[in-house]
Amino acid sequence: MWRTQHSAQSTNRRRRGNLLLASVPWLATILLTAASGQSAKLPRFQDHSVSSVYHGEVKPPDFGNPDQYDGTDLRCFGGDPAEYAKGHANFAGHFVIGRCTCGSGCHYLFMWDGLNGKFYRWFPFGPINVGPYGLGSTVPPVGYKGEQFRVDSTLLIVEGCIEGTCDCATRYYNWNGGEFKLILSRASRKPPRCSK
């Protein structure tokens, strides 16, 4: 009888110990998130909604003098701005976000106000690499979603690596009408070249 009772108590202690060990990573994540001042709740588009959405024709972007551009920039901003006016607002009510490629798996964003053509060339994260990385290797390739945005929200989500670095994350930005403010940054899986 004593052996059975002792064996049951020992089993219960092991279970509690295993339960405690299993909860440590989860608890550590919560504590680290709280300590870094970042909310565990991910920003959502509906939490950053705009009051109205412009549905009319957008003004062309004011790229300025094309002589200031060369290379990739010239390809993106040296053409006829009227070609860009054929689209519609796709971000934050009346803005238009466009993409310009800077190589395989790399691009950068630019934006203009569809109401007046004001051009925003620089984003806080610069060019991003979205992969895929590691194709043909023994590990699964790493790819990123790039950017996500909506016409009815001021939230911009960017997933990828800052060009030329191993700074890979999903970053959440809020457009305040004049600039992008970082709300949250969560590290992403890194490409194989970053583990060397």
Image (spheres, rainbow, N blue to C red):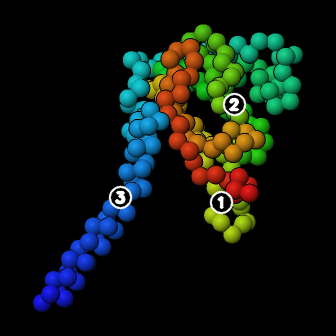
Mark 3 packing: few (<14 Cα in 10 Å), some, or many (20+)? few
- Location of mark 1 (residue): 141
Q: Is residue 1 above or below residue 28?
A: below
- Location of mark 3 (residue): 23
Question: Dot 2 lies on which element?
Answer: loop
**At which x and y percent is residue 54?**
48, 18
Question: Dot 1 lies on which element?
Answer: loop
Q: Earlier in the sequence, mark 2 or mark 1?
A: 2
- Please, what is the three-letter code of the amino acid marked with disc 3? Ser
Q: Is residue 162 visible?
A: yes
Give the left or right position of residue 156, taking residue 126 as reference: left
Q: Which residue is more in the foreground, 36 or 12?
A: 12
Mark 1 packing: few (<14 Cα in 10 Å), some, or many (20+)? some
- Please, what is the three-letter code of the amino acid marked with disc 1? Pro
Question: Dot 3 lies on which element?
Answer: helix
Instruction: Please tell me which residue is depicted at 64% across the width and 51% down the height of the picture.
Output: 190
Instruction: Please tell me which residue is depicted at 71% across the width and 34% down the height of the picture.
Output: 127
- Please, what is the three-letter code of the amino acid marked with disc 2? Gly
Q: Quadrant of residue 103?
A: top right
**At which x and y percent is residue 68?**
85, 16
Q: Is residue 118 above or below residue 29?
A: above
